[in-house]
Amino acid sequence: MPKPHVLRRLAACLSPGGLITDAHAVRPFETDGLTAIRERPWAVALPETAGQVRAVLGVCRDEGVPVVTRGAGTGLSGGARPRRDGVLLTLSKMRRVKEVDLDACTATLEPGVTNLAISEAVREHGLHYAPDPSSQIACSIGGNVAENAGGVHCLKYGLTVHNVLGLRVQTIAGDELVLGGKGLEQPGLDLLAVMIGSEGMLGVITEVTVKLLPLPPVKRVLLAAFGDLQAAGDAVSAIIAAGIVPAGLEMMDNPAIRAAEDFAAAGYPRDATAVLLCELDGPKAQVETDTERVRQLLETGGAAVRVARDEAERERLWKGRKSAFPAMGRLAPDYYCMDGTIPRSALAQVLGDIAELSAEHGLRVANVFHAGDGNLHPLILFDANEPGEADRARALGDAILRLCVRAGGTVTGEHGVGVEKLDAMCEQFSAAELDQFHRLKAAFDPRGLMNPGKAVPSLARCSELGGMRVHAGKLPFPHLERF
Amino acid sequence: MGEPRGDAWPRPDGLRLAVGTLAVDEAEALRAAVAEARRIRRPLGMVGHASKAFLGGPGGEPLSTLGHRGIVDYRPEELTLTARAGTPLAEVAHAVAENGQILPFDPPRFAGGVGGEGTFGGAIACGLAGPARPWRGGVRDAMLGVEIVNGLGERLRFGGTVMKNVAGYDVSRLMAGARGTLGLILSASVRLQPAPAVEKTYRLECDAEQADANCRRWARLPLPITGTCFLAGALRVRLSGSSQAVAVARAEMALATEDDPAVWEEVRDHRHAFFLESAAGPLTRVSVPRNRRFLREDALIEWNGCQAWLSESPPDELPEGAFATVFRGEPVGAAGAGNTADYARRLRRAFDPDGVLNPGIAS
């Protein structure tokens, strides 16, 4: 596999020190946020410009070397897992805010700019970039685009796809695609939409133009404690049905409440079966009307309700939610974070079913999630040092994802498929659908050099799993070899 | 292929009993028509009400989607709706209005179609949005899922009815505005929004430049604006929200004169005098980036300056990054520029390798 002339060619594309091949030095790049999955990259390339990215891709195309693109490495599905025989194209050195256009209310960024840095760069102008994934201090905008990242506030402000106006993308063929720009519409097919969330399978994002929104002048948070999961789930539906779109609507179950309270002393009621955190933002007059209405709805739904009196209390209530993940570290040595989405109305039912599965598998599960979007993040607690527990955690995770698909949902709401959910994709899509995905990829990357083996499982893989559905006794595409 | 997955796609029992067999057969008939067209290499042109035929016909043998109609699933508390392609837009709009909700992209309903003012499938395929586009999003922004027949005659489902879904490439959004070149839309799921408690329209006499300056100043502030429209020396502004929020914003913006709210639908559907007076001549839409200005006293300018209408053929000079679409008159060249268009063509072949879908639409 070592191809010295290829390494020489790659190094020539980059600034001095821009190519790392030393076994020690590549170690930090072996894994992304899904640390259970590791692989040593053959070489790590650290380009500083779009031109260098294009040059690296050119060498990889000529030499048939696979390319895995990596942003900040905070992804939770193994989408940036390197390959032993491939280049890990790491965009962390491309972190310039290229332009803030106050006339258009846009910011143009290199892909390595962190999510939080965007809002920090424009706060003095009374603006912000709305999507805020939990990892926002570390995750990069390029990675956000590749995963179509969500966050706590996407119920009202949308996902990355709703907040990105334009991209520059380098393809493996050597083309620079300029998709969208600063306008609302674009002629022809919406390639911008298909590029967002494509997990590094179609091209390398080298520039992102995002929409900036005015900072909401007023924010209010309500904390509602429920003695019953069904009532909490119903309250979520009642708020939405009443025509209110909260900025955030988060739910935690009892194990998560206790863990967060022990960790952050946020003032959550430790004996509640579930708490809802509801944030309303916007112009003062609107927020006041909505707060009163939400309080009534929650109380009618049987909750004990508290409205944060000041900014300090609002921050304390959020701190409990935001520290829920680190708090899990106190409950068990390891946890496995899932990411299914279900219709909101199925929340109570699915949470009940998860509790049953948890008992069956003998592993505890805590639930912290974006209730307003129906986006669940069950945290499966286990101890990797106990023989078999990691496998049981994995099996429980798969069972939970199947539950989400059966409830009319999806196996990933915002973390992406990566390598982690390849098998679950066989559950959600038919062979013909997966094949259409593969043809879509081939339109951008006919030789399959971009992030090979991620995001969309091969038909062979699904077939081996037995997950492929056979219709009327006929396999789709009988001419294809399956095994 | 594309076998029904009843539990993965909402089909409430009541509706399944009411419309089940007939509708499934209709979808299957559409699929079979595409498969047969591919076999005999005779391309098809998808047609609903043909209310947007002025954008250019699809070419090919006409295939009507009108038999495949009906709202499949509507859950107000989920803010989602799934309807079949042939469902009249008016029916969808009426159903959601009854529950105090709206289609956020507020698609135009053009008169002059055959049998109606546009279908749900046609609205998605054409990707046109109404006056609130900058604030409530376009068709692509509301897309949650689709069922299509691709050019191979396969029934495929992408996305679903949940708000967040990153499993696989985002084919659902790609269908918005693709004008049926990637697949025949059988049904689609979209996200709805609650209708605001109060909606008020105000009028400010000013020229195009002052109107633009106002819109840009307001865009930097947290105001409940959901429409702007400059025409003939006056800017109309729509405010939406609670009555207090609208009243406060009105005072802040110094909007004195209340105006007729009918203007928004009239502009959306091209029933406004601006469109009717020039009905015999050409009509051009100019799409303008947020950082550019296209200001003319004789234009109708909406979307905070991002969309302008002209009663003439596309002007020779447009601001950088702007593009023109002919709504009436001699069509301009194929959409898309340079290598982007190459990739768009490859993408089209990935969905329709034999070119059986809407051959009249250039790519």
Image (cartoon, coloured by chain):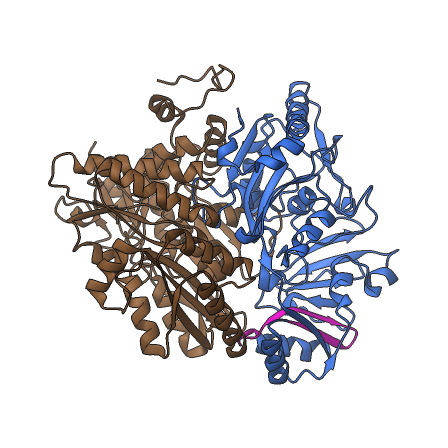
Q: Residue visible at 22% across and 66% down? A: A264
Query: In which quadrant of the rendered image does the C terminus of chain B lie?
Result: top right
Q: Nearer the viewer, residue A303 or B282?
A: A303
Residue B16 occupies quadrant: top right
Q: Which residues are magenta?
A: B219-239
Q: Position of residue A129 (x, y in %)?
A: 43, 66
Instruction: Tell whether A483 sits left or right of A331.
Output: right
Q: Is residue B224 magenta?
A: yes
Q: Residue visible at 57% across and 26% down? A: B154
Residue A262 can be seen, yes or no: yes
Q: Is residue A174 magenta?
A: no
Residue A447 can be seen, yes or no: no
Q: Nearer the viewer, residue A212 or B113?
A: B113
Q: Position of residue B187 (x, y in %)?
A: 62, 38
Q: Nearer the viewer, residue B339 or A247?
A: A247
Q: Position of residue A95 (x, y in %)?
A: 33, 62
Q: Main secondary structure of the magenta part?
A: strand
Q: Residue visible at 23% across and 49% down? A: A19
**What is chain B's hue in the picture?**
blue
Q: Position of residue A308 (x, y in %)?
A: 37, 74
In this rendering, is residue B235 above or below A387? below
Q: Nearer the viewer, residue A51 or B39?
A: B39
In this rendering, is residue A320 above or below B43? below
In this rendering, is residue A33 above or below A357? below
Q: How many marks?
A: 0
Chain letter tied to brown: A
